[in-house]
Amino acid sequence: MSKCIVITHQHSLSSPGGGTLSCLQIAQHLQKLGVDVFLVPVSNDPTVELKASSAQVMPVPPSRIHYLFNGINVAKSVQRLIANKNIDAVLSWDYEAAFLPKLLQAKNIVFGTIASSPSYETWVKRKTKLPLVKAVTDAWFRWRPLKSADVVFVSSNFTRNELITLFQVAPERIKTIHRGIDTVFGKVQRIYRGEVSQLIFYGSLAPLKGVFDVIEALGTVAAQSQHSWTLKIAGWGNEELVKKAARDRGIEDKVILLGRLDSIALARELESADLAILPSHAESFGRAIAEAQAAGLPVISYDVGSVPEIVEKDVTGWLVPLDRVDLLAGAAIAAMEDPQKTFAMGLAGRERVARLFSWEQTALAILKGIEEAKGNRYE
């Protein structure tokens, strides 16, 4: 079993988002299994980083040239660790790994990546003013580490298939491991209230996560039905744009902005909610969706990416085709019209998440994947 693992991360350990939270949880649960863990995040505020985790944290400053060159400082930090510690493996999250493959190969250290982009195909097809520059930098800084890794951990079969199809990553090097969910959500009390009136969206307030789709859909619900409801929005981003969208749809008085919440505060809000509407446009896992289900809430989502692996259609929630905001509205009305069925769907989702998604399973699977990759080096 691996005893010392380095985990690099392209952002600060205090940055919002599922990727950062997953990084911290993986480190914590590897430690519980007796692994010595070193975290190497990119940050210009060491004080914040050192408080973020019980693991040993060695933050590195960002590049003064361009963020894609952050990997130079990451590689230097990892090299110093290798000189002083018996490192079994290095796990990386993204482009910060660009300068690691040759270094780790020369030292016979297992190199693993955690592939967590919501959609690699969407990124590949993203249009820029300099498409050739984008193609070259992506190939070297992003796709090359994925292709050269001894083991690639993905959190869904959707991402697995993307890596095989887009980048020809060897299937035998890819390990599908579901992410865990914070146990605080499983402890949320769920009591049948006889109505579906408290709705919630949470996460980044970016178009990709679907907050504007939610507002548009609920504008339709307000116009087409007499149901009484309130939408709470928790997250980080441009709140003014969200407020404007609500005004434009005539539902400003029904929308409450909560700001960014920690897990405990979010769990309290989920406890008072009846339905989560989380129509992300792309997901490699769907952490927020799984959290809502762990709290016993049924979910309305788009049928994209990994979401069908998290939500069992018409059993734990509603899945509608991407961009069909009218069907989001229809699902919300259906949930409001049958509160007993909606409540039962939430309980079914809670049971499924408790059975499938735990950080203990994630950490064990990572260790197993590293051991298999190490064994393959000697075959």
Image (tube, rainbow, N blue to C red):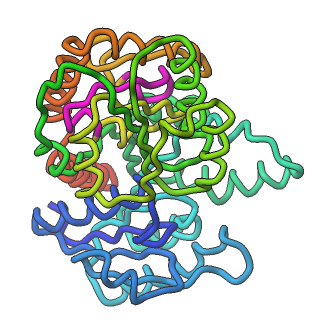
Where does residue 279 sit, x and y in percent of width and height? 49, 30
Residue found 52% across the figure and 13% down from its top? 327
Is 326 situated above or below 33? above
Furthest-right residue in this view: 129
- Say which of 153 and 182 sits in front: 182
Total marks shown come to: 0
Residue 351 in percent (x, y) is at 13, 28
Is residue 303 covered in magenta? yes
> In the displayed structure, does residue 248 sit left or right of residue 368?
right
Residue at the image position 31 percent from the left and 51 percent from the top: 373
Is residue 342 in sight in this rendering? yes
Corner quadrant of residue 98: bottom right
Look at 39% across and 56% down and name the residue there.
Answer: 112
* Residue placed most toward the observer, 24 or 200: 200
Examine the rendering and report whether any part of residue 167 can be seen: no
Choose between 76 and 346: the one closer to the eye.
346
Quarter of image, res 194 = top left
What are the residue bounds of the magenta stretch? Answer: 292-308
Q: Relative to 287, is 310 above or below? A: above
**Residue 61 location in percent, x, y?**
55, 84
- Quadrant where the N terminus is found in the figure: bottom left
Relative image position of residue 320 (x, y in whole percent): 49, 15
Q: Residue at x 33, y 10 (%)?
A: 337
